[in-house]
Each structure stands twice: as structure tokens, then as C-alpha cells.
């Protein structure tokens, strides 16, 4: 019963370090701790599965390290995605803020009587465009801001 108990303790220690590493704040420490926890757990499993062979421990450790790197890649990819989403949201909010500030500025000057808007109807004579199309005489309405 002793070997099975040793494997259980090794697995629990490896998994505990793996989980604690995933919860740390420092990215460099987190990366190293995840690799160490995964490699240690893999080595313990390889050692027990291969009947206490150092070769089994080495193979298990290498496999655990690969798993740890895959987990680190997933975490890094997720952080990059979240950063980009936050950056885009910030840019969007800044554009909205600028829009509302400009709109409020125009509204304030209109209320003060400094900015006048009026519609002016102008006649357009009959003419031909550069491609030869005949445009009949008509009127256009334009907005004049003073």
C-alpha cells in the first residue's frame, strides 16, 4: 500500500502547485510554476506507471512539461484576446466621448446665438455633364452655417 500512497501524495502535491500557480498574479512566476507543477506531476505518474523506473519518470516529466506549456499558451492567448477587446472598447468609447463633446459644443454655441443655420434655395441652370448627360433646370437646397 505504500507505493500507491506515495503516488497519491505526489499527484496531490503536483496538482496543488499547478492550481496555485494558475492563480498567481505575476506572469513569469505563473509560467514557471505551471511548468514545474505539470512536469512534477508527469514525472510522478511516469515513475509509478513504469514500475519506479527513472526513464519512466523522465518521460512523464517531459510529457508533463508539454502539457504545462500548452496550458501557458492557452493562458497567454486568452490574455492577448482580452487585451485587444479592451483596447478596442476603449477606442470606441473615446470616439463616442469626442462625438458628444463636439455635439454639446455646437449646441451651446447655437443657444448663445453665435452660430446661425439657414436653408437657402439656389437655382441650377440646364447644363450637360462631362459625359454628355443633359441635366434640366432645377433648384437645390443647401444649408448655410454662419
Image (tube, rainbow, N blue to C red):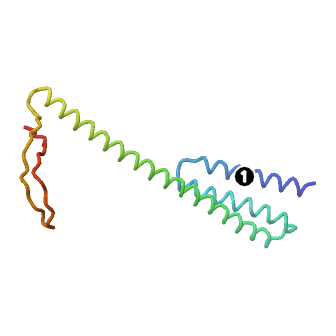
Q: Is residue 51 left or right of residue 119?
A: right
Residue nearest the viewer, comparing 133 with 63: 133
- Place residue 135 in its image quadrant: bottom left
Residue at 65% over, 48% down:
20
Secondary structure under the numbered disc 1 in the rendered image: helix
Q: Tell me: residue 12, above or below residue 56.
A: above
- Give the residue displayed 9% in from the left and 33% down from the top: 116
Q: In screen coordinates, is 80 left or right of 121?
A: right
Asked which quadrant contains residue 102, the reply is top left
Q: Is residue 85 above or below residue 100?
A: below
- Of the 4 image quadrants, the one containing the C terminus is top left
The foreground one among 144 and 76 is 144
Percent from the top left, x then y, of residue 130? Answer: 12, 66
Q: Position of residue 56 (x, y in %)?
A: 80, 70
Q: Residues within 10 Å of mark 1 (few under 14, many from 20)?
A: some
Residue located farthest toward the right when viewing the structure as drawn: 1
On the rendered structure, is 122 left or right of 1? left
Quarter placement of the N terminus: bottom right
Task: Estimate the x, y position of residue 98 in percent, counting from the top left.
Answer: 26, 41
Up/down of 1 relative to 141, above or below: below
Which residue ends up furthest to the bottom in the rendered image? 55
In the picture, measured across the screen, residue 86 lies left or right of residue 12, that is left
Q: How many marks?
A: 1
The residue at which mark 1 appears reads as 15
Residue 30 image point, x, y percent: 58, 53
Question: What residue is rendered at 23% in x and 36% in y?
Answer: 103
Q: Residue at x 79, y 65 (%)?
A: 46
Amino acid at each position: 500500500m505504500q507505493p500507491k500512497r506515495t503516488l497519491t501524495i505526489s499527484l496531490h502535491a503536483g496538482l496543488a502547485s499547478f492550481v496555485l500557480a494558475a492563480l498567481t498574479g505575476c506572469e513569469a512566476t505563473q509560467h514557471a510554476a505551471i511548468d514545474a507543477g505539470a512536469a512534477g506531476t508527469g514525472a510522478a505518474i511516469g515513475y509509478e506507471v513504469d514500475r519506479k523506473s527513472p526513464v519512466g519518470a523522465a518521460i512523464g516529466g517531459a510529457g508533463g512539461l508539454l502539457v504545462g506549456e500548452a496550458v501557458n499558451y492557452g493562458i497567454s492567448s486568452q490574455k492577448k484576446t482580452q487585451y485587444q477587446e479592451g483596447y478596442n472598447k476603449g477606442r470606441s468609447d473615446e470616439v463616442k466621448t469626442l462625438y458628444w463633446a463636439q455635439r454639446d459644443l455646437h449646441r451651446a454655441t447655437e443657444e448663445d446665438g453665435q452660430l446661425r443655420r439657414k436653408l437657402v434655395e439656389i437655382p441650377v441652370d440646364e447644363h450637360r455633364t462631362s459625359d454628355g448627360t443633359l441635366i434640366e433646370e432645377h433648384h437645390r437646397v443647401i444649408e448655410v452655417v454662419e
